[in-house]
């Protein structure tokens, strides 16, 4: 029960990221740098408090994929945060949740995994759902809305790359891996931010500072800590089902708190997208003929 609560709390925290990001008057790359830096420091503190040491031999042996995954994590955040700026939180979140479809499509090529008929059908339904969301967004809204959805999909592509790259990282614990990836992302983003944005990161308004701390400590640090702590005590099917608390919270915030509107077609498209990935990730239990007879008595 403790693991389930921890995982649900992490999903609720992740679902509020869009609302927090909206209150930080920095560029998306600056937000990504601060969230990775503050989150890394917080998780390092947790790491040392529970007296676990980082294995630098494992870090060296996985160096290439750690660097690539750091780039993927940074790109993921930059485009996701920009997506929140340009379109509704609901649309950005739905675009971002296209990541499992990218993973399904690329797994046979990269991981040599067999693509089942079920996965092909789920991918097709998810694509139809995303086309409905994008098509309705283009018809009913501004060019910024379409660009925001596009950035959400690019963020999903980076996240899918991160998930696939993590498959090649061997023998590292999830918390240890996250700290290294956040640290790598911070180091890689520093020159990019200072070359593209200059020193504007030091001119942040006072009103943004509390939200920067929330983004780094709560949304990144505590969120990932609860995520991995909860994941250790849950089965894969439970993780897949509870993961949908994140988009549910984000869509609730979008509609109730921010009063952002979604058309019926976009709602239907979102249902197809999330429903298809949920079905694909969930293993249904078949009831035997004997069990059916017992239940029918």
Image (cartoon, grey):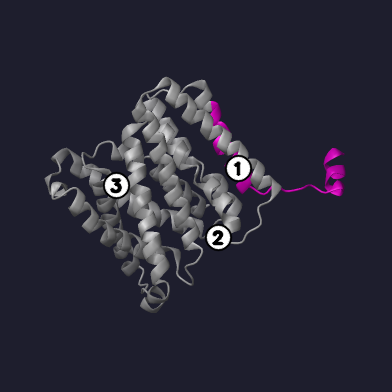
* Pointer 3 residue: 215
How much space separates mark 2 and mark 3, taking CA atoms?
33 Å
Q: Nearer the viewer, residue 59 or 113?
A: 113
**Residue 239 x/y as whole percent:** 54, 51
**Residue 144 x/y as whole percent:** 34, 29
- Answer above or below: position of 258 versus 273: above
User: Residue visible at 31% across and 69% down?
Assistant: 48
* Pointer 2 residue: 110
How much space separates mark 2 and mark 1, taking CA atoms?
17 Å
Give whichever of discs 3 and 1 has the lower sequence position. Answer: 1
Q: Is residue 179 visible?
A: yes
* The residue stretch that appears in magenta: 268-297
User: Residue visible at 52% across and 21% down?
Assistant: 264
**Residue 250 x/y as whole percent:** 42, 36
Look at the image and say whether residue 67 sits in the magenta stretch.
no
Q: Is residue 235 visible?
A: no
């Amino acid at each position: 029960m403790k693991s389930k609560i921890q995982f649900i709390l992490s999903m609720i925290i992740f679902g509020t990221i869009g609302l927090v990001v909206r209150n930080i008057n920095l560029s998306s790359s600056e937000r990504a740098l601060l969230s990775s830096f503050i989150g890394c420091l917080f998780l390092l503190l947790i790491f040392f408090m529970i007296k676990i040491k980082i294995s630098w031999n494992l870090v060296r042996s996985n160096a290439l994929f750690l660097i690539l995954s750091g780039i993927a994590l940074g790109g993921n955040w930059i485009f996701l945060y920009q997506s929140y700026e340009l379109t509704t939180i609901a649309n950005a979140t739905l675009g971002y949740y296209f990541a499992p479809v990218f993973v399904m499509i690329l797994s046979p090529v990269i991981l040599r995994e067999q693509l089942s008929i079920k996965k092909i059908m789920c991918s097709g339904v998810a694509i139809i759902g995303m086309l409905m969301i994008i098509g309705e967004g283009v018809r009913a809204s501004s060019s910024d809305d379409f660009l925001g959805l596009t950035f959400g999909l690019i963020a999903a592509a980076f996240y899918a790359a991160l998930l696939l790259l993590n498959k090649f990282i061997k023998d590292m614990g999830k918390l240890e891996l996250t700290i290294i990836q956040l640290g790598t992302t911070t180091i890689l983003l520093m020159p990019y931010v200072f070359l593209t944005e200059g020193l504007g990161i030091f001119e942040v308004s006072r009103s943004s500072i509390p939200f920067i701390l929330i983004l780094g400590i709560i949304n990144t640090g505590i969120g990932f800590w609860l995520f991995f702590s909860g994941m250790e005590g849950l089965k894969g099917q439970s993780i897949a089902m509870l993961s949908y608390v994140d988009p549910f919270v984000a869509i609730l915030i979008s509609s109730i708190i921010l009063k952002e509107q979604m058309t019926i077609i976009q709602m239907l498209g979102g249902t197809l997208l999330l429903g298809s990935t949920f079905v694909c990730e969930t293993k249904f239990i078949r009831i035997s003929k004997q069990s059916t007879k017992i239940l029918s008595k």
